[in-house]
Amino acid sequence: MSPGADTRTEKLVAAPRDGAAAGDALRGRGLALVREAPLSAKAGLAFIVLYGLVALTAPLIAPFGESQIVAAQFEPWGYPYLLGTDNLGRDMLTRLIYGARNTIGIAAATTAIAFLVGGTAGLLAAAVGGFLDQAMSRVVDVLMAIPQLVFALLLLAIFGTSIPVLIAVIALLDCTRVFRIARSVAMNVAAMDFVEVARLRGEGLLWILRREILPAVAPTLLAEFGLRFCFVFLFISSLSFLGLGLQPPTADWGSMVRDNATLITYGDLTPLLPAAAIAILTVAINFVVDHILHVAGSRHAR
Amino acid sequence: MRGLQIEAGGAAILHRLDLTLARGEILGLIGESGAGKSTAGLAALGYARPGTRIAAGRVELDGEDILALPEAARRRLRGARLAYVAQSAAAAFNPAHRLIDQHAELAVIHGRDPQSARQDAVALYARLGLPDPGRFGERSPHQVSGGQLQRAMLAMAMACRPDVVVFDEPTTALDVTTQLEVLIAIRDVVKAAGNAAIYISHDLAVVAQLADRIMVLRHGRLVEEGPTAALLSRPREDYTRQLIAPRRLQKPAAAGGGAVLAVSGVSVSYGTTRALDNVSLSLPRGTTLAVVGESGSGKSTLARVVTGLRAPDAGTVEFDGRALPPTLRRRSVDTLRRLQMIYQSPDSALNPHQTVAEAIGRPLQVYVGLKGKAQRARAVELMRRIELDEGLLDRLPGQLSGGQKQRVCIARALAAEPDFLVCDEITSALDPLVAGSVLELLLRLQRELGLSLLFITHDIATVGAIADAVVVMHRGRIVERGTRDDVLSRPQEAYTKALLAAVPQMAPTWLDSVLAGRNGGPAPPV
């Protein structure tokens, strides 16, 4: 997600052997990150990979079609409907698998856009300062002053509830938060002498942002990415629960909870399955992000 | 207070240190940063910083081992019988509360009634020579100067009449003239109260004024210990000798050509404060001009104007006979290349995410157009020039010592092949011995490369070592200028004289003679 970090890794991999010590310090960051990870982070990573695989291969592994009505309503767990059927008689397991694809895909796209826009704007505001900073900050203040859910409902009511609109609306709301954090962290970095050194050297804005400021801001943004991703998730779920999220018959975990909620009154745990799917992914992501932050933090403590 | 024996360990920051402090005695602890001075001082309070622990040993207060006491009992001792004065008073006070409240709070916690605690505070303020002692405590920490705040903290430490006070570099962050006042206050109060004190500093001259006995620490080990006068006159160890008489650098006078830099009539204001007021100076090619002054005198602003970081409100800067554009953006790359700056804190001036090779390589690429192997070869050459091992090229700044980092900063400036260096307090964050070697390097580079230097500092000893000419600044104005020898040995202006007189001398009698010289001045009543 951070272009600076990516290019650095590539460069190191391609670097000739003469930079041996540099390699010791920096090479294979990602690999070492996994190897030294505590059990919680490893488990988290495993779950994220599992979710990712399920989302990518949904049509292959799902026993039935996404919106195919296969049996009577609310069938109990058993063969061939391993987790029973939902309120319309669709296979629950199939819906869960497709739900991963829809929910995670949208959340990932939304968070990525929010970070690209909000993060870039935040760094820019911190590095340039002055009028640009003031203008952007005030616009963000205005956007943040409106309650998030109400604002989202309003926008969705105006523009309709197609998937692109959903992504755009949530990304817009989220990028204000990302902007705030990116700006405040980058402000501290921009005040450092090495940024001034780069200015004195006549470096362009892009260099200062990418090479001087971004590496120091990246760990914080990454942590925020993990959190935001989960929030987006929950936000989509709550929108779906309100009926303004993904529209039927698309499967997503939020609306699956809503549609099958009545089963709870009969002592059936099925509606908790999509809820658990959300919860497990949230916890997994946070374990991994915690570990990454821990590593980044200890590297700097020296 | 009879026996105090500390052994602290873990990664062995202190190696089996024995330390005894008699009642009424002041012990000086001296050494470079990382020598374990502060660790020893804190251990005397039975405290170990997070991440360290007292692995072995005893800390005895009047024969009782305070390390064996429960934490709550130790906490009762701290503040009451053991007190601590930290380096940064600004960080030690809560900015939201008035000084006297913070002072009284401590006394009240240790069982005094608020009224008498306040009266005590006012009496202490008076003794410490603080202005308007009756109302001084009503102010918040940000309303008083650094020196006054340091004295207020001293008063707070004395609030419960402790048996032992630990001073941890209480004057290091202060200007010389302020330092003088604080030193006088410390000595006066400690002598009057008759309590024992441990005074930690890296400045031997300061410690010599206060301590009865001095311990020299290095790498967590005791190097030498002795009564102050004996230690200063007959040091046994080489290391102590180096501390007492740092290699006296004396720059041979350089003739210099025409003016490479001419600043004329420059004024800068921040809001309503005048940082620079009609400042003019010129610097002959190949020479060093030292700009001396206390913090707030405008010397760093001058550096910012010269480098183009701050456009002057009035006046011009000429470089090599041509007027420099006031702002950075309008200066050509070649001008930027020829005029390089070195900063006070190498920690902040080096990007912690870039290796040494990247830091030095970037100016080589931008200014000289070197890439790949050629860039690497030139970087290795530069490392030799600044006397660092080329193996360090692939290290991150976090893996280097302070002196090494500052050398890397110098190499980065040299990579641009500059004509002119602006050095902003480049040695003040370094230990004395390290600073000396960096200055030596700079002098050699100037000789070899014919560099012109604008050297900003508050340290008079540094001026003596490297300057050809000196400019003394006070509140944004130049109060005195001349050759190094003229300004240092025959100062004309009262301010320059006061500045020079406030520099601590190694002789233990220096503070007495300063006080005697004031005859009846503002010396606080004893």
Image: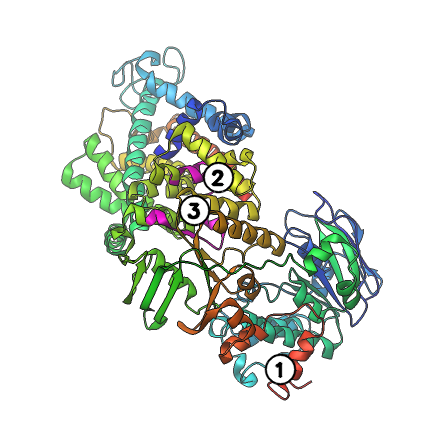
Q: Earlier in the sequence, mark 1 or mark 2?
A: 1
* B125 or B271, nearer to the observer: B271
Image side of residue A20 versus residue A227, left or right: right
Percent position of residue B112, x then y: 67, 76
Q: CA distance from mark 3 to mark 1?
A: 59 Å
Q: Secondary structure at mark 2?
A: helix
**Residue B340 inside the magenta-drawn segment:** yes
Q: How many C-alpha atoms fall within 10 Å of the one at disc 3: few (<14), some, or many (≥20)?
A: many
Residue assigned mark 3 = B413
* B280 or A226, nearer to the observer: B280
Image side of residue A225 versus residue B221, left or right: left
* B484 or A142, nearer to the observer: B484
Q: Residue at x 73, y 49 (%)?
A: B14
Percent position of residue A155, x then y: 19, 42
Q: Earlier in the sequence, mark 2 or mark 3?
A: 2
Residue assigned mark 1 = B115
Chain label for disc 2: B
Quadrant containing the C terminus of chain A in the rendered view: top right
The quarter holding residue B151 reads: bottom right
Q: Secondary structure at mark 1?
A: helix
The residue type indicated by label 3 comes to Ala
**Residue B235 inside the magenta-drawn segment:** no
